[in-house]
Amino acid sequence: MKTVQEALNLRSCILENFEMAVTCTDLRERDALMTYVIAGGGPTGVELAGALAELKQHVLPNDYPELDFMNMNIHLVDNGERVLGAMGERSSEKAKQYLEKMGVKVWLKTRVTGYDGKNVFTASEKNIPCSTLIWAAGVMGKIINGIPPDAVLQNGRIKVDECNKVSGTENIFALGDVAFMMQEKFPKGHPQVAQVAIQQGINLGKNLCSGMNVVHWKKFSYHDKGSMATVGRNKAVVETKRIKTQGFFAWLIWMFIHLLFLVGFRNRIIVFFNWLISYFNYERGLRLIIRPFKSKKIG
């Protein structure tokens, strides 16, 4: 999910599922419409699972009183040994505890192998009937013509040197999620987060503008500013070089950082008061299907 349109499509898909579940007479089909599988236990998957769990607890029962939300299931599936694998073990364990307390079923060491529109298939032969699979297990780059085949890894990432030059080329560079740069601190490549792409872009821009020979270019060194993930109301995990905390205080830090990065004082005040109102009345904004996820056939 990279654009506003894709976010609206996901929201429409979720709401349309409940609209269909209200009128569905087949119990199995209704359960599948109310079941969500999220593939990937990184920050995106954890935050999405927490958001769905809060909707299940506080919002959707008021919108759809005809449905029994005991039958709504949220599954978080990850191939790793713990959620939030890039963070410390304590933060990972806390996030897992938060999710399970909110009713999310967490499946670790489980890899999603396929989806046919009705069932999610896993390598452990556990199949989950559901109408919606949400992919949050990373992205695969779109390989363009001209990239040496030897530079492309199986997962779609492109091997680059420490100045982001594509392996086997002289004037082609790759940045961010698509780039695989193996360093001592990151033997499996850098995490696929925005800060990596931003810092690599700044470093490469300075190198290109320096006029120096490639041999004398400055090598990229990733400065990790920390990681955060919000699981739900009063529940978050934060890790920086100086601070490692979980729970309510971490949730306050998460909100403060996000407010800080908004453009303009007026926007910060408006968002703050909107969050304050939502905190006390459990409101989650208008739930209107403004653009149908499933287009209607004409004729």
Image: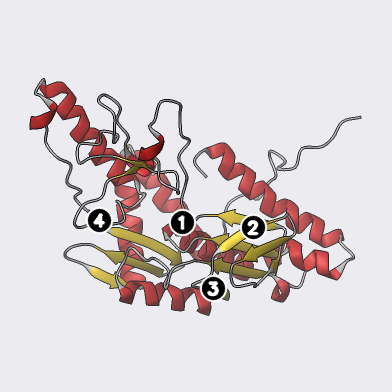
36 relative to 26 in the view: left or right: left
Report the residue at 29% width, 32% height from top.
168
Which-is-in-front pick, marks 1 and 4? 4
Q: Secondary structure at mark 4?
A: loop
Q: Secondary structure at mark 3?
A: strand
**Residue 139 position within the rendered picture, expressed as x and y whole percent measured from the top left:** 47, 47
Separation of marks 1 and 4 at Cα, in angstroms: 21 Å
Is residue 145 visible from the viewing direction of this image?
Answer: yes
Query: Between disc 2 and disc 1, whose residue precedes?
Result: 1
Residue 44 tag number: 1
Residue 211 tag number: none
Check disc 3 and report the residue beneath it.
107
Residue type beneath disc 1: Thr
Is residue 64 visible from the viewing direction of this image?
Answer: no
Residue type beneath disc 4: Phe
Separation of marks 3 and 1 at Cα, in angstroms: 16 Å
